[in-house]
Image (cartoon, rainbow, N blue to C red):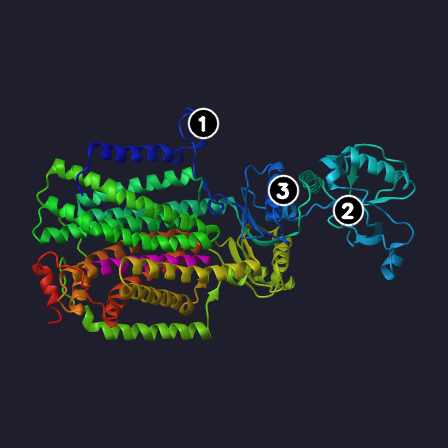
Amino acid sequence: MLYFSRWKSALIWLAVLVSFVIASPNFFSRETLAKLPNFLPKQQIALGLDLSGGSRLVLQVQNAGRGELERTANIMRQRLEELGYGKPVVEEENRNQIRVEVPGVYDAQLLKDILSVRGDFSFRAVDGTMSPDDAIRGTPPADSEIIYSYDDPPVGYLVKKQPILTGTNVTDAKATLADDDTEPVITLTLDDAGRKNLAEATSHLVGGSFAIVVDNQIVSAPAVDEKLDTNELQISGAFDLQAANNMAVVLRSGALPQNVTVLEERTIASALGEDYASAAALAALLAALLVGLFMVLSYGILGVIAMIALAVNIIILTAILSLIGASISLASIAGLVLTIGLAVDAHILIYERVREDRRKGYSVVQAMESGFYRALSTIIDANLTTLIAALVLFLLGSGTVHGFALTVAVGIGTTLFTTLTFTRLVIAQWVRTAKPKEVPKRRLKLVPTVTHIPFMRLQFVTLGISVLACAIVVALFVNIGFNYGIDFRGGSMVELQARSGDANLEDITERLAELNIDSARVLPAKSPRSALVIIGSQEVGDDAEQTVAVKLRGEFEQDYSFQRVEVVGPTVSEQLSRAGVLAVILSLIGIFVYVWVRFRWQLALGAVLSTLHDVIILAGMFIVFRMEFNLWSVAAILTIIGYSLNDTVVIYDRVRENLRVYKSAPLPAIIDASINQTLSRTLLTSFVTFLAHIPLYAFGGADIRSFALALSVGIIVASYSSIFIAAPLLVQFGLKPRGSEQAGDSMDDELAQSLNLES
């Protein structure tokens, strides 16, 4: 395992070098990159909206037919680009939804005005045969209808149903000021068919008027004094220059095929995004430093090699994310911290195996060879079970959770590569050059080198306690339930920052009451200048949530800046709820199938039940302490599913190994021995992963803080369940050695002592 041919060594170093070159633009400013030669890579990972600031909308296209969703997305993209919004992200989601992300734009209402307006434009002849009032009270002519104006109050007009011309006749539209520079106007350029229709219609309308209709509302109804035979004409109405420019863009891009509804809105100000970015970067750096210090104290030079491998791991991860055009968000940084934990866990598995084999009398070189070889299958199994949870989250998640899953999935791949190739290569070179006589001593010892704890004597007690705890949580869920965040119940969350002085929570509460907004709560934020407004779902449709957002802006815009706005309609909340439940179920099914194929049904069922135990206990924490349950909570649960399986697989892998060797030994004794053999790894990995999440909790912001807390508790629960739930279940399921399995190595003294625990 430690031998590398020259060409293999060269390929590994080449992969590291290429990754460094690809990742290097992320460590320089754009100004510096502009000065570099063009043949060098310059692709950087973009900052997500939560770190750079900007707006994100999810819009639903009503009755979208084949090709209409794509056409709608293209029209929306054209509108945003023509307004100078750079390169917005406009992507289709599900069967009838479009996700729009625009960095640097903090006025989500402006985006909604641009994207949700259909832009159905027409000229209609005003029907003078009946007054609008008579038509409203009676029956209008069959070929006419009443349409109201934009005015406040709106004015009704009786107009012909058959249009004179439509938006398809408009080849260009520009917003300008009228000749007297006082009134905004829109100058339209018509095609030949439009000019002909206009000329013919106005020749019969002299002395009358025609209405300019946009989305079934009348902008204006100018009088016709003469026949209009022209390709250019101007329209005016009750709009300012910005509104005129927006309408011109809408007319140029064309009408949307169907009506759209805003389902979800998330906006964050650039200043708050920068604060999040600084805090998250600090959290990731401190996590790496804490883990690095622990590894060096625990493994000496081997710990240094592990940290070098971790740095290479992060470089390769950065390179891959750069190549695929991913963006980095708070969720990505949380995924990076989890990747750090997975990478360190892989090294701990190897190093503990090395020490174990050294105690058996292997030479240093033999122990290194054996350590890598015997830890290989465990590392692969443990990481692949975590990958299953990450892939499910990637496929079913959205927004920030999607970024977390992507980072973890790619991080697992880079962890396997660096651990099984780069680390081996560096250790092989160290062994050849330093010729060590002994494995580096542990300077920090959390557990004894060898333990003989009779865990199986407690199996009925621990199983009983866990069953009782799970039953209590289920009862609490039925009677109390989760404290759902807006992701799952719908509603709005707004972070206000006072433009001067501190935020007045009482005043905000009183003003909300005057707006007749139901179920509003005002909470203090991290700064005295800020306040958090949380409004429950209005439960009367997606438009109601958007109406609340408009009311809030109108009421508080003058006194407060909107640092963060999140609006989730009932449609999206239902989708997220279904996706969250489905993600947990599919993760458990996928893991069950994988463990069954790799091990046996007893181990697969034991792994799933112990993992389900962890999910229930973690859910109980959210219920008992009334922690907000949101998308981050689902991400935490799925991560713990992967981590719990990681822990369980390590023990199961050792049980399988010992069953092959000691088929005549009692199963409880073999399980006890397996737990004791892997105990140092279990506790060390739990401690290191726990250590990595402390900075996330301290500096990661509200969402990341709850995520880190859930993970920290989940790590403790997962370590408990892998020892006291997953292992005893094998006894209950009657696991036995397979007849085809042959005995291997002779029994060493350390294991013999463990096997005597039950005798």
Contact flag, marks 2 and 3 (Cβ < 8 Å): no
Image point (13%, 59%), residue name:
743
The quadrant of the rendering that contains the N terminus is top left
Q: In the image, is residue 559 above or below residue 198?
A: below
Helix, strand or loop at label 1? It is helix
Going from the N terminus, do you reach mark 1 or mark 3 first? 1
| Residue 175 seen by the camera | no
Q: Is residue 687 left or right of residue 513?
A: left
Contact flag, marks 1 and 3 (Cβ < 8 Å): no
Indicate the position of residue 50 as horizontal and vertical percent values. Answer: 48, 47
Tell me the residue that label 1 is attached to.
34
Image point (87%, 42%), residue name:
223
Front residue of 621/584: it is 584
* C-alpha distance separating marks 2 and 1: 48 Å
Q: In the image, is residue 431 above or below residue 506?
A: above
Helix, strand or loop at label 3? It is helix
Residue type at tag 3: Ile
Instruction: Please identify the quarter of the rendering in which residue 25 is found.
Output: top left
Residue type at tag 2: Val
* C-alpha distance separating marks 1 and 3: 32 Å
Q: What mark, if any, has residue 75 been given in the picture?
A: 3
Q: Residues within 10 Å of mark 1 (few under 14, many from 20)?
A: few
Number of marks in picture: 3
Q: Residues within 10 Å of mark 2 (few under 14, many from 20)?
A: many
Q: What mark, if any, has residue 357 been given in the picture?
A: none
